Amino acid sequence: SVNSAVLVFDAGNKLSLVNKFGQKNLDIDGASGQKIEEIFDVTEEEVEKTIESLMEGYEIQKKWKRRGNGISCLVNPSIVKDETGDPYCIICMVYDMTKEEEMMNAIVEANKAKSSFLANMSHEIRTPINAVLGLDEMIIRESKDENITAYAKDIESAGKTLLSLVNDILDLSKIESGKMEILKGEYHLSSLLNDCFNMVHMMAHEKNLKLIIENDEDIPGTLYGDEIRIRQIITNLLSNAVKYTPKGQITMKVKWQALPNDYLLLGVAVTDTGIGIRKENMEDLFNSFKRVEEKKIRSIEGTGLGLSIVRNILELHEAKYGVNSVKDKGSTFWFEIRVIR
Ligand code: ADP
């Protein structure tokens, strides 16, 4: 009467019993004396290994396909030993996973469709935003009326926020659909760092925060790699540091170390004297749409996408990264990436 298949094999791995459910739903003949590897699409070695593990007392679950009709099964084998400790029989509970698998496939497909929809939409939205920002810039340049200039500056600020949000969504959907690629080219590390500094300098100045950059003295000149993505990571960390620091300073330290074959390890650490992060929240930081301490940061603009994109780009580069933080004292976000000289 059980709603899944129960198969009993003797000590020689020959089928000796099967319940009605198994006969009907998995089309197994109880009198056939078939072995596990004849019923399921597995090798003899895998069955032997499974039996060995069962003898050692491990709990086992296998995803095996029914030979012949390819039905996906979840097989839960257990072993019954006789009084001398030798195998007496093997009992397999077998669940038909077809529906679950179909559901999983549908979810994966739906998620892909969502990502590609988002990617297309974000791309389409960028064009009109850029047009609005371009025309708005002309108003700022040409208007002599203070009020109108002020309105136009508000449009500029909102437009830029919107553009960066759309860019983040585009990046995330690229990542989710596996389309984010590393694009390599030559670049100057010092001008990259300079650009990052300039991107956040105004924001830091407006909040009265000191912005300090400490480079290793002999910082390498030309490097080869994905400049845009490295710049994106650093800018993200720096702008977060500025965003989540009410007073004090932001320090970016850049160091490097030579590796064999013209590779070098570039280390960047951004330290702030900001609100800090509780230990229990640290793991969540790098997940999409996750913001921590939401009550406290409600007034600070953000979507929780930045660090998730940073994490994905770093993982694509096989880089190491992490965060050290003390609540109310500040945080250090760091990464170490292998680049080519
Ligand atoms: P957001 O768009 O919300 O800034 P991020 O993905 O960049 O998204 O960061 C995720 C969350 O991590 C933030 O919402 C914030 O709670 C926390 N966080 C990030 N950087 C810092 C920092 N330097 N100091 C304190 N909290 C931070």
Image: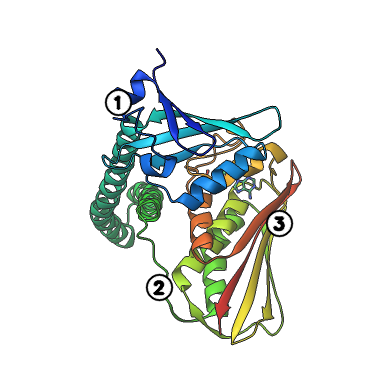
Q: Nearer the viewer, mark 2 or mark 1?
A: 1
The C terminus lies in quadrant: bottom right
Mark 2 / mark 1, whichever is N-terminal = 1
Helix, strand, or loop for circle 2?
Answer: loop
At which x and y percent is residue 25?
Answer: 30, 25
Q: In the shown orientation, is residue 252 left or right of residue 97? A: right
Closer-to-camera residue (73/110): 73
The mark total stands at: 3
111 w.r.t. 223: above or below? above
Which label sits on residue 249?
A: 3
110 w.r.t. 269: above or below? above
The N terminus lies in quadrant: top left
Residue type at the position of mark 1: Asn
Mark 2 / mark 3, whichever is N-terminal = 2
Residue at image mark 2: 183
Q: How crowded is mark 1: few (under 14 residues within 10 Å), some or many (20 or more)?
A: few
Mark 3, ligand 1, within 8 Å: the answer is no
Residue at image mark 1: 25
Closer-to-camera residue (21/106): 21
156 w.r.t. 195: above or below? above
Q: Residues within 10 Å of mark 3 (few under 14, many from 20)?
A: some
213 w.r.t. 188: above or below? above
Q: Which residue is drawn at 65% across and 82% down?
A: 259
Residue type at the position of mark 2: Leu
Closer-to-camera residue (199/276): 276
Mark 3 / mark 1, whichever is N-terminal = 1
